[in-house]
Amino acid sequence: MRSYKIYFLLILLLPFTAFTQRSTFPYRLSYSLDISLTVGNLVLVGTNRAIKAHLSVPKADEILQLDRERLFYLDRISFRTYNSTTERVSHYAMLTTITLPVLLATYSKSFSHLSTMAVMGIETYTTTLLVVQTLKALTRRPRPEMYTDEYDIMRYKGIESLNAFPSGHTAMAFAAAGFVHSCQEVFKQQSLWATFLMYSTYTSAVISGFLRYYSGVHHLTDVMTGAVLGWSIGYFIPKIHLQTRRSNHSIQLTPTANGMIHCALNF
């Protein structure tokens, strides 16, 4: 839980620097929005810990009752057995993907801009991680290896055996892709560098998700759900931080021939 504490500390501290400077930067932080996201994440932390306190390691008879034929059709026909080498590569693919949004710092012209982007990124990854962990604890879906004779309970540390849904690695990778995509739409950069950044993030996210499935650590639907979930969080968190251009709002009062006044609000 130490990593969660670091995330929340940064979320609470960075806005103070971002609020000190007004600019035309398209994003801004607000106490109401960012505190709401922080409180929501803290609620997820509490919920996650409360659920996990009542979870138990799967017993041998429970594992024997698992039947691959009862899996969802798409997972059954795409079933993969575990491969340790591919799983290790999937870790590196995910780590590479979640670091790519750091390159968005090239659009920041000041420390205030940079801190705003950093807070949005932290909120994106924290929210994605906590939502995924809570869903894992609620669904308790067995990993594919539990349906084979090669299942090793020690490798998953027992309780991790039932953490298949959704794929956390895939969710984090696609959160990065959604975040970059959302920011690119706002900055409207048409340069070769901007195009390379967005497509490389998507490519890396797809590779990360595919490796999680191909390694046999997750079912195909685990990966697909993680991709949709992560992308949605990564895409929409920057959107809710877009500042309203109040300078573009105006009220026009025009007298009419019958002595009335016509009021028009322009956006």
Image (cartoon, rainbow, N blue to C red):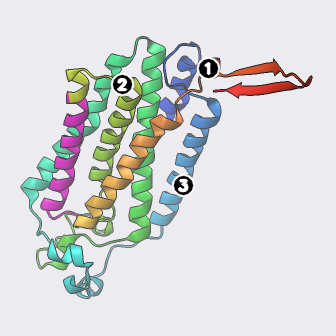
Residue sticking out furthest to the right:
259
Tell me the residue at 48%/24% (across/down): 116
Query: Residue 156: which disc?
Result: none
The x, y position of residue 41, in whole percent, is 52, 47
Magenta stretch: includes residue 165: no
Callout 2: SS: loop
Please state if 219 lies on the left or on the right of 132 as rendered. left
Tell me the residue at 74%/21% (across/down): 251
Name the amino acid, label 3: Gly
Query: Residue 46: which disc?
Result: 3
Kindly indicate whether the residue at mark 2 contacts the one at mark 3 (C-beta within 8 angstroms).
Answer: no
Q: Is residue 239 positioned above or below 260 on the image? A: below
Q: Mark 3 or mark 2: name the one nearer the start of the chain.
A: 3
The residue segment tinted magenta is: 196-218
Query: Residue 248: which disc?
Result: 1
Pointer 1: residues within 10 angstroms few (<14), some, or many (20+)? few
Callout 1: SS: helix
Can residue 108 be seen by looking at this rendering?
yes
Question: Residue 139, located in which quarter of the rendered image?
Answer: bottom left
Tell me the residue at 17%/42% (across/down): 92
Q: Mark 1 or mark 3: name the one nearer the start of the chain.
A: 3
Q: Is residue 246 positioned above or below 82 on the image? A: above
Can residue 3 be seen by looking at this rendering?
no
Pointer 3: residues within 10 angstroms few (<14), some, or many (20+)? few
Query: Residue 188: which disc?
Result: 2
Number of numbered discs overlaid on the protein picture:
3
Q: Is residue 243 positioned above or below 178 on the image? A: above
Name the amino acid, label 1: Asn
Could you give the CA–CA distance between mark 1 and mark 2, rounded to whole angstroms? Answer: 19 Å
Tell me the residue at 36%/18% (across/down): 107
Could you give the CA–CA distance between mark 1 and mark 3, rounded to whole angstroms? Answer: 42 Å
